[in-house]
């Protein structure tokens, strides 16, 4: 009985091989077909996560080999000009992707601004409208208490005390939601105010050390405040920590802010993987920071606590088109 010949699996040509072949075709015959191959190669390079430096190095290498080839060397100028056209076509998907990212960043900034406006509206509604309702409740209770005898009056007083606490908490929440101190004094005093509240509510010791002073452009201060706010909320909600440290400073032209806790830690990869992600906090922090040209790194593992590091290059602070101060 004949043994069946093993079927060979045909692998697609490697990127480098395909590059040489398409480049050769374009140099040889020119034409739209070869340029189309170049464009497809550019798209493939993006999917294969090739960096621009890798593409440039490969192009340089292939061009050098062609120039070293005796027959082609005489067409040196023509070769480099045609090569430049080919390279431009390969890079055009990168250009489009870059524009897409720029557009997404602008959209994200606008979305953040809209969200901030909405948060402001809710904060004022909680502060003013709920505050006024509580005043009305106080007045109604006082009116009611006038008709009561002493023992019942005491019970009404107890209700008034509870209402006072509700009012205090609502004021606190509305100020944390959109602290006026953020607009008036900046994000660092606003973080101190926030930390004070979280510390009391979650029974956490929060230490803040900063070597920077002064203000940053408005949208940057808001993004930093919101990021630290989420980091503190997460520490209070998930970490079981007893201490949190916030450090703010500058290093090598980069603005840095770290938030560290001594809690239970977590598996960062698993929490961020598409299938298992549940919350919006970590992704929201990353998006807010991306929108202002910054980045977030997270260092955590079970039992080792968590350290978040926000980094923002100084140029990003100056280049921010939303600069308001
Ligand atoms: N400081 C921390 N200590 C321990 N675990 C943390 C800490 N920060 C985040 N995590 C873990 O990472 C997960 C994702 O956090 P994320 O902020 O994205 O979502 P969430 O807090 O669960 O929900 P949301 O922020 O949408 O209210 C959390 O559910 C928690 O398991
Ligand atoms: Mg969260």
Image: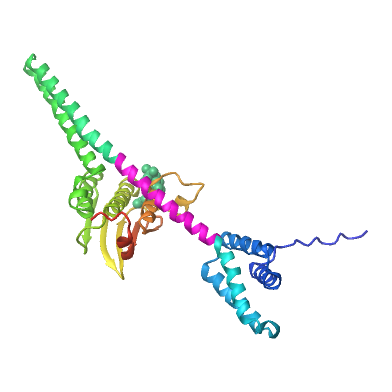
Q: Is residue 59 left or right of residue 323?
A: right
In this view of the protein, which residue sits in the foreground, 243 or 11? 11
Please name the residue shown 34% across and 48% down the image: 234
The quadrant where residue 24 appears: bottom right
In this view of the protein, which residue sits in the foreground, 36 or 198? 36
Q: Identify the magenta region.
A: 93-118
Which residue in the rendered view is the most extreme toward the right?
A: 1
Residue 250 locus on image (x, y percent): 27, 66
Please name the residue shown 51% across and 47% down the image: 275
Please name the residue shown 60% across and 80% down the image: 77
141 versus 316 height, above or below: above
244 versus 252 height, above or below: above
Q: Main secondary structure of the magenta part?
A: helix
Residue 256 locus on image (x, y percent): 30, 62
In this view of the protein, which residue sits in the foreground, 263 or 7? 7
The magenta stretch spans residue 105: yes
From the image, which quarter does the C terminus lie in?
bottom left
Does the rendering let one see residue 49?
Answer: no
Residue 231 locus on image (x, y percent): 32, 51
The quadrant where residue 248 appears: bottom left
From the image, which quarter does the N terminus lie in?
bottom right
67 versus 84 height, above or below: below
66 versus 325 height, above or below: below
In this view of the protein, which residue sits in the foreground, 227 or 80? 80
Please name the residue shown 34% across and 60% down the image: 309
The quadrant where residue 8 appears: bottom right
Does the rendering let one see residue 131?
Answer: yes
Q: Is residue 149 left or right of residue 259?
A: left
């Amino acid at each position: 009985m004949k043994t069946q010949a093993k079927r060979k699996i045909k692998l697609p040509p490697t990127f480098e091989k395909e590059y040489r072949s398409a480049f050769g075709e374009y140099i040889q015959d020119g034409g739209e077909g070869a340029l189309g191959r170049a464009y497809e190669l550019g798209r493939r390079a993006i999917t294969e996560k090739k960096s621009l430096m890798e593409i440039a190095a490969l192009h340089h290498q292939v061009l050098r080999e062609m120039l070293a080839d005796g027959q082609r060397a005489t067409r040196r100028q023509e070769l480099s000009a045609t090569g430049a056209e080919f390279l431009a076509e390969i890079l055009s998907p990168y250009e489009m992707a870059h524009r897409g990212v720029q557009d997404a960043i602008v959209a994200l900034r606008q979305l953040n601004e809209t969200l901030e406006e909405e948060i402001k509206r809710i904060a004022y509604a909680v502060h003013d409208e709920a505050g006024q309702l509580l005043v009305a409740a106080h007045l109604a209770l006082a009116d009611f208490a006038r008709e009561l005898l002493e023992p019942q009056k005491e019970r009404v007083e107890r209700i008034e005390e509870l209402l006072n606490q509700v009012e205090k908490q609502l004021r606190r929440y509305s100020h944390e939601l959109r602290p006026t101190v953020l607009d008036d004094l900046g994000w660092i005093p606003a973080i101190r105010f926030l930390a004070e509240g979280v510390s009391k509510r979650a029974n956490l010791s929060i230490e803040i050390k900063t070597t920077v002073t002064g203000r940053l452009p408005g949208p940057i201060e808001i993004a930093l405040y919101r990021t630290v706010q989420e980091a503190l909320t997460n520490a209070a909600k998930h970490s079981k920590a007893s201490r949190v440290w916030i450090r703010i400073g500058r290093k090598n032209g980069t603005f840095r802010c770290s938030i560290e806790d001594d809690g239970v830690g977590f598996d960062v990869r698993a929490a961020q993987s598409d299938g298992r992600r549940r919350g919006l906090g970590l992704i929201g922090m990353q998006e807010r920071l991306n929108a202002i040209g910054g980045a977030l790194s997270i260092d955590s593992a079970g039992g080792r606590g968590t350290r978040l590091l926000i980094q923002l290059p100084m140029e990003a602070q100056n280049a921010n088109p939303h600069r308001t101060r």
